């Protein structure tokens, strides 16, 4: 009986732990207006993908450049779904705020580790969100696992931002 209670407690704790990882590590989150637009930039230039740089991974996995727009679209779509129309993310050039998501690491399973920087259009830092971590996929090709991880990362970040809007 004690083992069962301990097992259930550990299971519940393991569900809670990943959801609370991301945090504002610098600055503060500004007040965003309902319906405001954010220019979202997903940057892979400093990413470590399966232990390689983006350029090395593109040579190793030639379909990277073909599938990269789908990876970005999955991130955008899942993040937008979590924002529930409160604010909009996309490729908006003339807006007040830019949200730059720097992908730091993508594992073989497609797990993502990122940081996000919210800044004004002219480059003034508003907030830096660190420790953004999300699980990748469970089945499929390397790129399918990365697509799943990208979508999950968009969900995690979208939910975090939505919670800071309240």
Image: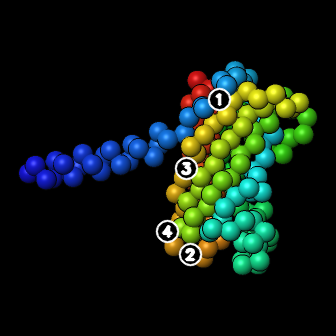
Q: Tell me the residue at 66%/65% (across/down).
A: 49
Along the horizontal axis of the image, is 80 left or right of 98?
Answer: left
Which residue position is annotated with label 2?
Answer: 140
5 lies above or below 163 = below
Whether residue 116 can be seen here: yes
Quarter of the picture holding the C terminus: top right
Which residue position is annotated with label 1?
Answer: 26
Q: Select label 1 or label 4 by which is in front.
A: 1
Residue 103 percent across, percent down from the top left? 68, 53
Discs 2, 1 touching: Cβ within 8 Å: no
Mark pair 1, 4: CA separation: 33 Å
Mark 4 nearby-residue class (10 Å; few <14, some 14–19, many ≥20): few
Q: Secondary structure at mark 3?
A: strand
Q: Secondary structure at mark 2?
A: loop
Mark pair 2, 1: CA separation: 37 Å
Residue 89 percent across, percent down from the top left? 75, 41
Which residue position is annotated with label 3?
Answer: 133
Tell me the number on the disc at residue 146: none
């Amino acid at each position: 009986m004690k083992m069962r209670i301990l097992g259930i407690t550990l299971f519940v704790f393991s569900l809670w732990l990943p959801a609370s990882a991301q945090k504002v590590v610098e600055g503060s989150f500004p007040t965003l207006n309902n319906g405001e637009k954010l220019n979202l930039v997903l940057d892979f230039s400093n990413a470590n993908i399966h232990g390689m740089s983006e350029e090395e991974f593109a040579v190793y996995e030639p379909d990277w450049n073909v599938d990269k727009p789908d990876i970005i679209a999955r991130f955008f779509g899942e993040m937008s779904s979590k924002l529930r129309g409160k604010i909009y993310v996309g490729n908006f050039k003339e807006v007040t705020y830019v949200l730059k998501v720097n992908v730091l690491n993508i594992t073989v399973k497609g797990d993502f580790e990122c940081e996000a920087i919210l800044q004004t259009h002219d480059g003034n830092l508003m907030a830096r969100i660190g420790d953004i971590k999300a699980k990748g996929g469970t089945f499929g090709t390397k790129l399918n696992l990365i697509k799943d991880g990208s979508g999950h990362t968009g969900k995690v970040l979208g939910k975090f931002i939505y919670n800071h809007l309240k």
